[in-house]
Amino acid sequence: MIRSMTGYGAGESELPDGRVLRAEVRTVNHRHLSTSVRLPRGWEGLERGVLERVRAALSRGSVSLAVRCESPGRDEDGVPALDLERARKYVDLLYEAGLELSLEGHLDIEALTRLPGVLRMEGPPAAEPDEEALGVCVEGALREVVAMREAEGRRLEVELRAGLGRILAEVEVIEGAAPARLLRERGRLRERVATLSEGVEVDEDRLAREIAYLAERWDIAEEIVRLRSHVTLFEEGLGGGGAGGKAGKRLGFVVQEMHREANTVGSKANDAAISASAIGIKEELERIREQLENVE
């Protein structure tokens, strides 16, 4: 089973002092694993352990993980506090500036509180770092994000298999149309030779050699075999899952090879139906390639 790189998860755990740790993880697609971690103030020393847990659960994607510490029933924004010493210093400096520069005016309380640092918000004191509680809430969030990525992966798999079915349908059209073009070409050559020779009997051996030459130039049997083989390989990759986070990369390589074979079929086509089917295959491969960009 493949996994998407898009997901969200949340987890929480309780600290000994009654506070609650809450973790949120958001992931989107990325070529590699890129992780951003934000922990409560004073907990920065535990970031390495969090990164190891992320690497153990996820292998690709851009990961944003934020952990906050909350006190139930309490305003986490803190309470306002007045820095009276700073306010006095502002008043003294402004009074001195007014005398020195002969300025008139007065400083009221509203203007004073707008000065930097006079009125500030004091949050609750930081909780003591708790590695065990942090691990519990982070693991809970990671389990949820993995479950969401797997569910999205199942939906992607359905779409990808449908695309493979459409590719095989076009391959069957190509396979059915390939022999008829040689018969048409043989008839066309016979008519042209008869017209140019004005009734002289056609050299069947020479005509057969020309048809054999064209058959070799237009032969797409190997390309058809390889296209079917690549479709089978892709299906096996879907069923094998994303061990090591390489499923998306492996499937992308298979799509690249299928595109190469479709190009070759188109260049050898010399037939409207075959050309149209080759274009249809390439269009379907482009849709598959876009979907694979979000596969882990």
Image (tube, rainbow, N blue to C red):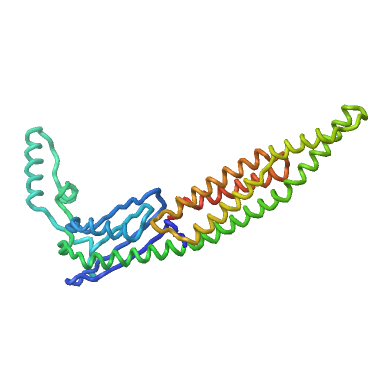
Q: Vertical placement of 268 versus 31: above or below?
A: above
Out of 241 and 133, give the one closest to the viewer.
Answer: 241
Residue 5 lies, in percent from the top left, at 42, 56
Q: Vertical placement of 259 versus 79: above or below?
A: above
Image quarter for residue 213? top right
x 69%, y 39%: residue: 216
x 18%, y 50%: residue: 110
x 9%, y 37%: residue: 97
Q: Quadrant of the C terminus?
A: bottom left
Residue 284 lies, in percent from the top left, at 59, 50
Image quarter for residue 137? bottom left
Residue 286 lies, in percent from the top left, at 56, 47
Q: Residue furthest right?
A: 199
Out of 1 and 72, give the one closest to the viewer.
Answer: 1
Out of 226 and 135, give the one closest to the viewer.
Answer: 226
Q: Residue furthest front?
A: 205
Residue 163 lies, in percent from the top left, at 59, 55
- 230 vs 52, left or right, is right
x 23%, y 56%: residue: 48
- 66 vs 148, left or right, is left
- 130 vs 236, left or right, is left
